[in-house]
């Protein structure tokens, strides 16, 4: 099977050597991992240690307690996540979830979420792709931490336009009233007070804010989030 379907690097697409796990050695050294200084609320890289919050989070009331991301959203990561989302590279989802666990396990333990909820896709987009990439990543995190995953806790009831290319106000308006609690999961969700949301990319946070507001209105006390990539405020 390895001869017929050799494992490939999710970032550059080259065939992995036997001693390479998940990603090639070259890309491993080049992955743009988020480091300090970063926003204390969303984890976005900022210009200096004196800057506590990025422009998007500064002075803004948020439904989200705190969040973090692993990599800066560069052109190479844009292509890699595009392969996961649009070309069905599901094996990459396991790699990304494993990387998040390896780098963010201590933060997840500090937050202590009771359950994990992936950001949902609209049923039409879910049907077209055949999977939800956020749910694939969430399942890996759930398996590694023992935290239950409720994939369909939230439903996306409006078919929204892609957020790409929209400014902050239009992103917020685009996802307004787009999410509801799944009535079939209402009772199960009510037992949890701390929820970890999972998504692939964080830019202005409009989508996660909309999801977080819906969860808070349902009685969740604290909503955290973790993403693969995040934009930079620098």
Image (spheres, rainbow, N blue to C red):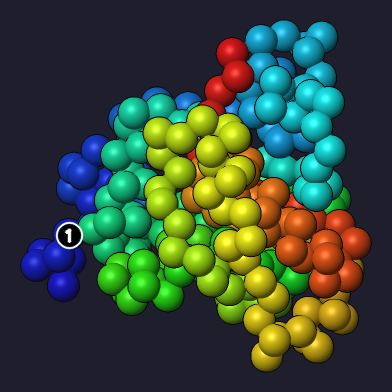
Q: 12 and 161: which one is in front?
A: 161
Quadrant location of residue 126?
A: bottom left
Image quarter (top left, top right, bottom left or bottom right) of the N terminus: bottom left
Above-or-below relation of 170 to 175: above
Instruction: Residue 7: give x, y in percent of width and height.
Output: 23, 57
Residue at position x 63%, y 61% from top? 177
Instruction: Residue 86: give x, y in percent of width and height.
Output: 27, 56
Q: 28 and 112: which one is in front?
A: 112
Residue at position x 46%, y 35% from top? 166
The reply, left or right, for residue 178 in relation to residue 106 is: left
Residue at position x 51%, y 30% from top? 167
Instruction: Residue 202: give x, y in percent of width and height.
Output: 56, 40
Q: Is residue 132 visible?
A: yes
Above-or-below relation of 145 to 19: below
The reply, left or right, for residue 31 in relation to residue 87 is: right
Residue at the disc numbered 1? 6
The reply, left or right, for residue 128 in relation to residue 47 is: left
Quadrant location of residue 153?
A: bottom right
Tag 1, which secondary structure? loop
């Amino acid at each position: 099977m390895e001869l017929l379907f050799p494992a490939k690097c999710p970032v550059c697409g080259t065939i992995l050597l036997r001693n390479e796990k998940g990603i090639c050695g070259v890309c491993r050294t080049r992955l743009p991992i988020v480091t300090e200084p970063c926003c204390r609320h969303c984890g976005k890289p900022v210009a200096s240690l004196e800057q506590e919050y990025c422009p998007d989070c500064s002075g803004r009331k948020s439904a989200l307690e705190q969040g973090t991301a692993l990599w800066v959203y560069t052109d190479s990561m844009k292509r890699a996540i595009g392969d996961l989302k649009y070309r069905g590279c599901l094996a990459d989802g396991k790699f990304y979830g494993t990387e998040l666990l390896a780098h963010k396990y201590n933060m997840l333990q500090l937050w202590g979420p009771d359950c994990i909820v992936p950001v949902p896709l609209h049923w039409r987009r879910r049907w077209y792709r055949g999977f939800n990439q956020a749910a694939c990543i969430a399942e890996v995190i759930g398996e590694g931490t023992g935290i239950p995953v409720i994939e369909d806790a939230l439903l996306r009831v409006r078919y929204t336009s892609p957020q790409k290319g929209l400014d902050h106000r239009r992103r917020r308006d685009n996802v307004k009233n787009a999410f509801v609690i799944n009535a079939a999961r209402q009772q199960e969700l009510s037992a949890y007070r701390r929820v970890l949301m999972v998504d692939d990319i964080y830019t202005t946070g409009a989508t996660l804010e909309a999801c977080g507001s819906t969860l808070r209105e349902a009685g969740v006390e604290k909503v955290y989030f973790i993403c693969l990539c995040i934009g930079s405020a620098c």
